[in-house]
Image: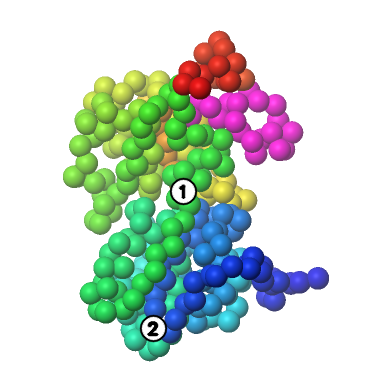
Amino acid sequence: MTDSHHPTLPSLPGTDWPRMEPGWVWLCGAGPGDPGLLTLHALNALQQADVVIYDALVQDCILDWAPQARHIYAGKRGGKPSAKQRDISLQLVDLARDGLRVLRLKGGDPFVFGRGGEEAQTLVQHGVPIRIIPGISAGIGGLAYAGIPVTHRDVNQSVTFVTGHDQSGHTPSSLNWQAIAQGSQVIVIYMGMKHAGQISAALLDAGRPVDEPCAVVSSATTPDQRVLETTLGRLASDIESSGFEPPAILCIGRSVLMRQVLDWQGMLAGAAPRDLDPLGRGLPAETACGG
């Protein structure tokens, strides 16, 4: 039997996997939490790295797959003391210049509200070679674990991803909430719990219905995952009374109703679907138009 301090490392299938060279930095997405959602390229990187600089949302068991590497925490969580972004970026440069194989491991996808673009640009400007390894973003994978499809033909042909706060920690002033409200069938908001009241008020003022279905998925894809189903009008008050804590994904739109039939984790635990036709189509799902 293997204990948590000496894990059995998964083996990669035989193929020509990329080799991490000394002096390189690989920026890699670790997915939304469940270690099973890592890509094989991420696993390959973990097994080669000399040093792993990881974010707050990276699970400890993922780091166990890099026992040969030094692990450096560089998490940034709202309202808590954390490293400055400039210092993190320059630390990556220094480690690479020391001839180390550097893995920058970020929750979700490094290019989806993860500052991966900033870090990669800094590295290139300093002459450090890079590789980008995408990851499953929480706005897609986290909602899927809650049984909420971000696109569904009976609901939406578009989805809008927005961040709930900007560099200052406030609701982004550059966002045109009126345009988002009027043009976005489904809205997925990252890091939006703190400002849920401001966001919901802006969307309601722009004409979104007060009874529009909403969901909050906290600690998505982890054993601590919790899901709150509510409406746009009650979003802020229900979050406050729920005791939910970040990290969380907010989803606004009728696709949230699909959780009533697609809550696969609930079904694994023995619960029956609440409604086999939550959108009220009145027809079997296989009769959806478009072939």
Closest to the observer, 130 or 161: 130
* Label 2: which secondary element: loop
Residue 271 falls left or right of residue 128: right
Q: Is residue 102 visible?
A: yes
Residue corresponding to mark 1: 138
| Residue 121 against residue 78 in the figure, above or below | below
Judged from this view, the residue extending furthest toward the top is: 282
Is the Cβ of the residue at disc 2 closer than 8 Å to that at disc 1? no
The magenta span reads: 256-274
Residue 143: % across, % down: 50, 40
- Label 2 and label 1: CA atoms lie apart by 30 Å
Q: Residues within 10 Å of mark 2 (few under 14, many from 20)?
A: some
Residue 286, quarter of the rendered image: top right
Q: Tell me what residue is drawn at x 55 percent, y 16 percent.
A: 287
Kind of residue indicated by mark 1: Ala
In the rendering, which numbered label is found on residue 120? Answer: none
| Residue 113 against residue 25 in the figure, above or below | above
Closest to the observer, 82 or 208: 208
* Label 1: which secondary element: helix
Closest to the observer, 147 or 101: 101
Query: Is residue 77 one of those drawn in magenta?
Result: no
Q: Tell me what residue is drawn at x 59 percent, y 68 percent.
A: 15
Residue corresponding to mark 2: 23
Kind of residue indicated by mark 2: Gly
Q: Tell me what residue is drawn at x 26 percent, y 33 percent.
A: 180
